[in-house]
Amino acid sequence: MAPMATLIFFLSVAFATSHVESTSNQYAFAIIESCSGCRLNRLPDVRQFIFEDVPNYNNVAFKHIQGAVPELVLFNENEEEVERLPLSSLTREECNNLLISKGFTKKIAKDEI
């Protein structure tokens, strides 16, 4: 019975370790989906985030979808949607913090090189 318990313990530790490694780099890229007018005009912080901050991030892009509410859509390396988060209730700072918390980094300016 002891060898079976040892095997189960080993397999559970191996699975947990591989799961942690795969989730640490879970998001390959992100797309912010939103309309570019109507609804967005009522959300000045989110609008500023989309048009002023998003272009400064690596692997993050804006996709215009007429009538869509602003959402952050996260994809894995297989281009599969992993997570979708609403942005409407967030401030500009919270939107930036959300991207950073998901592992996205800002581009390095040419004058910083």
Image: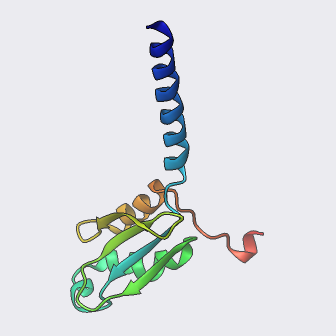
Residue at horizontal 40%, vertical 85%?
A: 63
- Which quarter of the rendered picture does the N terminus lie within? top left
Asked which quadrant contains residue 90, the reply is bottom left
Above-or-below relation of 17 to 88: above
> Which quarter shows the C terminus?
bottom right
113 to the left or right of 44:
right
Left or right placement of residue 42 versus residue 112 in this view? left
Q: Position of residue 112 (x, y in %)?
A: 73, 69
| Number of marks in the rendered image | 0
Query: Could you tell me which residue is drawn at 47 percent across and 75 percent down?
Result: 53
Q: Residue furthest top?
A: 2
Q: Position of residue 79 (x, y in %)?
A: 48, 70
Question: Which of 88 and 93 lies nearest the eye of the viewer?
Answer: 88
34 lies left or right of 54: left
In the displayed structure, would residue 55 be above or below residue 100? below
**Residue 22 place in picture, x, y as percent:** 53, 48
Residue 96 occupies which quadrant of the picture? bottom left
Q: Is residue 96 above or below residue 49?
A: above
Check the image and tell me how it is coloured: rainbow
Residue displayed at 48% across by 34% down: 16
